[in-house]
């Protein structure tokens, strides 16, 4: 147990926090705007990859089991964040193309990978996903990435890292309630890295998470939430709309970008934004807490759950 906590959670979280500290707190590196704006995404992808590696092992393409897509997503997110760091000053249509292209590529990945369940039938990313499910995932990724990148352009400092720390924590609880403990740990690593970013932002002049960080954070939250919904056997308390509340909570920051909130003292405005994002996630935590501590339990078929986890 101690080794699992050390290798799967503590070291990956420290590695991600170390990347952030280096890029946001070291003046020579902080002056490199493209690196400072992409390091949040690099830290998230690197921390997730390290956690997955300690839990499951190395990557392969196409992955033999569907959870292998998590490792590939983590590895792809690092150069993706770095690339977007060079586009921070470019406006339309770069942001929109980033979201749309990401959604299309992920949605078509079963076709791109060339794996088939039957001749001519591509193997889905995760069990029970059909054409409509892949299309919905593509739209969620595109919309989420575009909105969060736009938010990152106007909302610097600790607000977005705090929002994602809250959401990844809620997703970790939902994953644990659904019985996917290793993914719960990975969500926890991402939440810890976001928490470190929140603290570092207070001491480094309120940097922006950048387009790379915004795209990676939004993309991983949506993608991993989708993975847990389709690949686990959740209890009745963890429904699809519960996952929508957790993954969509950062979007609640959008209507708060108005003149009324802008006129508030900065501390009050920050805590208002945090409270709005936290409200649905706290409700989800209260809802799923009994299933985690064992007060209630689902009637899941253990063999069915095992077979889904290894498809």
Image (tube, helix red, strand yellow):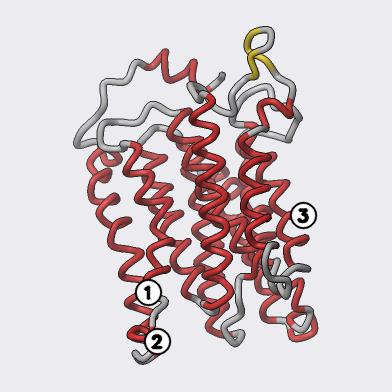
**Residue at the extreme top of the image, as rendered:** 119
Residue farthest toward the left in the current orientation of the protein:
295
Looking at marks 2 and 1 on the same chain, the residue that comes earlier in the sequence is marked by: 1
Q: Nearer the viewer, residue 53 or 278?
A: 278
Q: Are marks 1 and 3 in contact (CB under 8 Å)?
A: no
Query: In screen coordinates, is 203 left or right of 254?
Result: right
Q: Residue at x 66, y 74 (%)?
A: 21
Position of residue 43 relative to residue 204, above or below, is above
The x and y percentages for residue 182 are: 51, 38
Q: Which mark is residue 160?
A: none
Which residue reaches farthest front?
Answer: 92
Callout 2: few (<14), some (14-19), or many (20+) C-alpha neighbours within 10 Å? few
Q: Which quadrant is home to the C terminus? A: top right
For label 3, the crowd category at 10 Å Cα-Cα, with few meaning under 14, some 14 to 19 and many 20 or more, is some
Q: Earlier in the sequence, mark 1 or mark 3?
A: 3
Neighbor class of circle 1 (other Cα within 10 Å; few <14, some 14-19, many 20+) is some
Real-space Cα separation, disc 1 to disc 3, in angstroms: 31 Å
The circle drawn on residue 262 is 2
Where residue 194 sits in the image (x, y, percent)?
Answer: 53, 64
């Amino acid at each position: 147990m101690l080794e699992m906590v050390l290798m799967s959670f503590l070291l990956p979280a420290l590695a991600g926090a170390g990347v952030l500290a280096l890029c946001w707190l070291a003046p020579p590196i902080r002056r490199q705007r493209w690196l400072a704006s992409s390091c949040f995404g690099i830290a998230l992808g690197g921390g997730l990859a390290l956690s997955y590696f300690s839990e499951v092992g190395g990557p392969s393409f196409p992955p033999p089991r569907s959870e292998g897509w998590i490792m590939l997503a983590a590895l792809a997110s690092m150069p993706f964040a770095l690339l977007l760091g060079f586009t921070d000053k470019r406006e339309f249509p770069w942001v929109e193309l980033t979201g749309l292209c990401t959604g299309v590529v992920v949605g078509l990945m079963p076709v791109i990978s060339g794996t088939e369940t039957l001749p001519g039938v591509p193997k889905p990313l995760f069990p029970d996903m059909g054409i409509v499910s892949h299309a919905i995932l593509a739209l969620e990724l595109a919309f989420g990435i575009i909105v969060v990148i736009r938010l990152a352009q106007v909302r610097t400092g600790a607000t977005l890292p705090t929002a994602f720390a809250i959401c990844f924590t809620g997703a970790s609880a939902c994953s644990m309630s659904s019985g996917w403990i290793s993914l719960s740990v990975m969500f926890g690593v991402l939440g810890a890295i976001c928490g470190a970013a929140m603290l570092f932002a207070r001491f480094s002049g309120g940097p922006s998470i950048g387009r790379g960080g915004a795209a990676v954070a939004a993309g991983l939250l949506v993608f991993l939430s989708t993975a847990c919904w389709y690949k686990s056997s959740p209890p009745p308390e963890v429904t699809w709309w519960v996952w929508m509340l957790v993954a969509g909570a950062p979007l609640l920051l959008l209507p708060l970008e108005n003149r009324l909130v802008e006129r508030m003292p900065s501390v009050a405005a920050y805590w208002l934004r945090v409270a709005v994002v936290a409200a649905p996630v706290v409700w989800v935590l209260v809802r799923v807490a009994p299933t985690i501590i064992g007060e209630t339990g689902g009637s899941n078929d253990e063999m069915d759950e095992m077979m889904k986890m290894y498809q």
